[in-house]
Amino acid sequence: MKRALAVVLTLALVAWFVAAGQWSALGTLVRETPVSALAIAAAGFALSYVLRALRVWDEFRHDAAGRFGTCLRIVLIHNAMVNIVPFRGGEAAFPILLARHFSTPLGRAVASLVWFRLQDAFVVMALAMAVWPGLPVWLRLLGIVAVVATAFMLPRWARRTHAWHDGGPWQARLGKLRNAFAESTRHARFGWLWTIANWSVKLAAQAWLLSVLLGASTLIGAAGALGAELAAILPVQGVAGFGTYEAGAAAALLPNGIDFETGLQVALALHLFVIACSSIAGALAWLAGLSMPSAPKQGIDRQ
């Protein structure tokens, strides 16, 4: 059902653009965008990739043994797969690449990925509560405190002594995942620092490009960028994010006087640019790593 809804959302976006004759307008918008603005946004995305690689290198520093370039390659390929492969199937690239290059156990890699995604969600939600227009101050503070408290307590809950491994097969598997999750939250010394820095740069780059496309202030662009990223938290996503990303950005731009049609148009242009940057970076990383040795397969713990 979720996949069917995802396809419907994406097809609805495509149908609207075709029926409304928006493709020519989109092409004009892209052609009229200054190359300098695209270069600044691309540089921002590149810096965010480096910050994400630092987060991976920080957590897996003992396995990586100083191989930051390999961490960057893993991040770039994983990021490209997430943006291209439908239904979040690209997430599988992360544990596969960690196992190949660092012999990281599957459970450890998956738990680390879950923690990364939770950190991403916490930071984006906290930023949204801080800057979302029209919210009373008390609600902003309450929301930020709730997000920070949850982010603080979750790792501590995972580290508590439990007897899940003594239960049935499913409970035992969940117990292993909980232990791996607890282990993941222990290893990153500066995980929150890298996460906050990454999202600050990434959102700033998207806000900048949206503001140029709209001919509006960077604050208005920031609202659209936040709306697009918050849409990624929804349980139902369009194919490769198409549909939900654009709708989230357009909805967030409405309170700033940007009509929904214009919001969809500029959000699609931004989305295509984001996918182009991630795809080019991922392809270059893949080509650069063809000669890189893989970790020996023996001894890799798949549990």
Image (cartoon, rainbow, N blue to C red):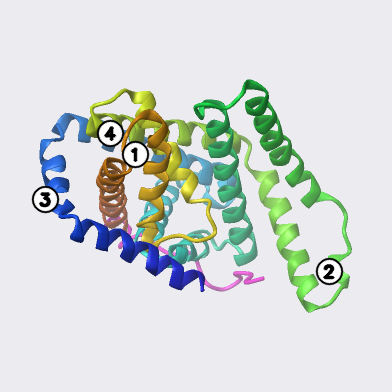
171 w.r.t. 271: above or below: below
Q: CA distance from mark 3 to mark 1?
A: 27 Å
Q: Alpha-carbon distance for marks 2 and 1?
A: 42 Å
Q: Amino acid at mark 1?
A: Phe
Which of the two discs, 2 and 3, labels the residue nearer the N terminus?
A: 3
Q: Over which residues does the magenta segment extend?
A: 287-303
Work out whether residue 94 or residue 59 is closer to the camera in this orientation and state it.
Answer: 94
Q: Which residue is mark 2?
A: 165
CA–CA distance between discs 1 and 4?
Answer: 11 Å
Mark 2, other Cα within 10 Å: few <14 / some 14–19 / many ≥20: some
Q: Is residue 139 left or right of residue 274?
A: right
Label 1 environment density (alpha carbons within 10 Å; few <14, some 14–19, many ≥20): many
User: What amino acid is found at the position of numbered circle 4 in the picture?
Assistant: Leu
Question: What residue do we see at 72% from left, 41% from top?
Answer: 150
Q: Which residue is mark 1?
A: 45
Along the viewing direction, whichever of 237 and 114 lies nearer the viewer: 237
Q: Residue at x 34, y 61 (%)?
A: 84
Element assignment for label 3: helix
- At 51% from the left edge and 60% from the top edge, which residue is drawn? 98
Which mark is nearer the camera, 2 or 1? Answer: 1
For mark 4, give the secondary structure: helix
- Provide residue 139's location: percent of width, then percent of height: 66, 28
Does 49 sit left or right of 266 as displayed?
Answer: right
Visible residue check, residue 217: yes
On screen, 207 above or below 290? above
**Circle 3 sits on which residue?**
24
Q: Position of residue 62 (x, y in %)?
A: 59, 48
Q: Residue 266, which numbered label?
A: none
**Disc 3 and disc 4: Cα gap in Å?**
20 Å
